[in-house]
Image (cartoon, helix red, strand yellow):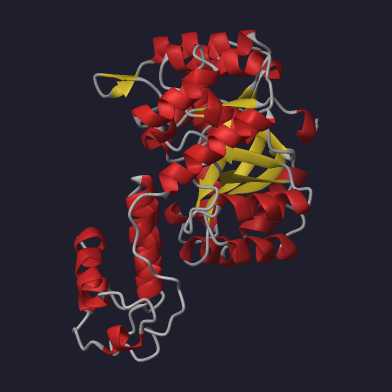
Amino acid sequence: MSIDLNAMPKLGFGLMRLPEQDGTIDLDQVCRMVDAYLETGLNYFDTAYVYHGGNSEKIVKAALVKRHPRSSFTVATKLPAWCMKAEADRDRIFNEQLERTGLEYFDFYLLHSVEDGSNGETYERLNCFEWALEKKAAGKIRHFGFSFHGSPEYLEALLNAHPEVEFVQIQLNYADWENPVVQSGRLYEILHRRNVPIIVMEPVKGGTLAKLTPELEVKFKAVHPDRSLASWALRFAASLPGVVTVLSGMSTPEQVADNLRTFTRFEPLSEEEKAIVEDARKTIMGAEQIGCTGCRYCTDGCPMNIAIPDVFRAVNTMKLYGDEFRPKAFYRSLVGQGSGRAGDCVACGQCEGVCPQHLPIIELLKDASARLDA
């Protein structure tokens, strides 16, 4: 039976950051968290083949399948490109996922972390889109989509090539709205314009937006002293038209309780609240940055073929957002596509001679190398 994607629960339970005890997932605590979530009528659980070393999918069986009626919950999981070399790996992984979870079918199935370069190429090379449709026709998948970490241009191309995709999951939060690497705002606008249902991941940016500077916290608390900072981030994402579900990787019963307070009687952000969130975003964006405008005058004559503006974009993202994983992945992709490393700079100075911003590019590349080449 298919599901009305536009009537999905606004809050989804992400099974990526589960509580642990002595290095293993704390099943008793997870069961209590799952039960509290289900008791409110919410039912969307998101896992993946690689979460918690594969143990997240096993928790689905222990906490859900063995304890609750199948009709009371829906499960989403994902196929990872980096675990596949041949077409046979698709079924190998899928069958293992069914065994781990104890399920006969998945309500939602995603290609995991589709992005420009190797992951996207792997899914196309192994015909994963066509394979997923076959699984859907066989009743093993109810709804098919992908999670996305690539560029807006690539997203447009994918949607053009694969109109069979029913939903897309993207990283979206107010801090990343204009992040030059994540580009949440542009990705959202593409999907919303095309009426593609959107599932949001990282609405609190891995917990970053649950703890802000004292100055910002005071502004939020002045309006709602009894609400958490995380609730503001969740409401920002859930208030956007076209967003059907916002995932929260809940790690404690307290986080579950706080999120349920936010969504039980959900209120979209008011205009006043939107202004406060925008002020916070601008403050976060105000961190010291490399003043590169991306004119690319510096790249044509670089003897080491270093994509200097893109390297600086990765560094700026690290400075602005305190995030290392995504900028470093972006940088590795640059190098993989033929760019020289920041540390390959031979200090010839041609770049500084043409830079209209008069940036000390040689020194900036040394700093970038220390951040990105280690």
Residue 25: percent from the left, percent from the top? 36, 21
Q: Identify the residue at horizontal 27%, vertical 74% (top origin).
A: 341
Residue 326: percent from the left, percent from the top? 40, 53
| Above or below, 227 relative to 320 | above
Res 307 → quadrant = bottom left
Q: Is residue 105 visible?
A: no
Left or right of residue 367: residue 197: right
Q: Looking at this view, is 335 or 274 the one in front? A: 274
User: Which quarter of the rendered picture does the N terminus lie within?
Assistant: top right
Left or right of residue 324: residue 168: right
Q: Is residue 370 visible?
A: yes
Residue 351: percent from the left, percent from the top? 31, 85
User: Which quarter of the rendered picture does the C terminus lie within?
Assistant: bottom left
Residue 239: percent from the left, percent from the top? 68, 32
Q: Identify the residue at horizontal 35%, vertical 72% (top origin).
A: 335
> How many numbered badges does the structure rendering display?
0
| Above or below, 78 relative to 254 | below
Left or right of residue 343: residue 323: right
Res 292 → quadrant = bottom left
Q: Identify the residue at horizontal 73%, vertical 44% (top origin).
A: 136
Q: Identify the residue at horizontal 42%, vertical 44% (top origin).
A: 284
| Above or below, 126 relative to 239 | below
| Above or below, 352 relative to 318 | below
Q: Looking at this view, is 332 or 112 the one in front? A: 332
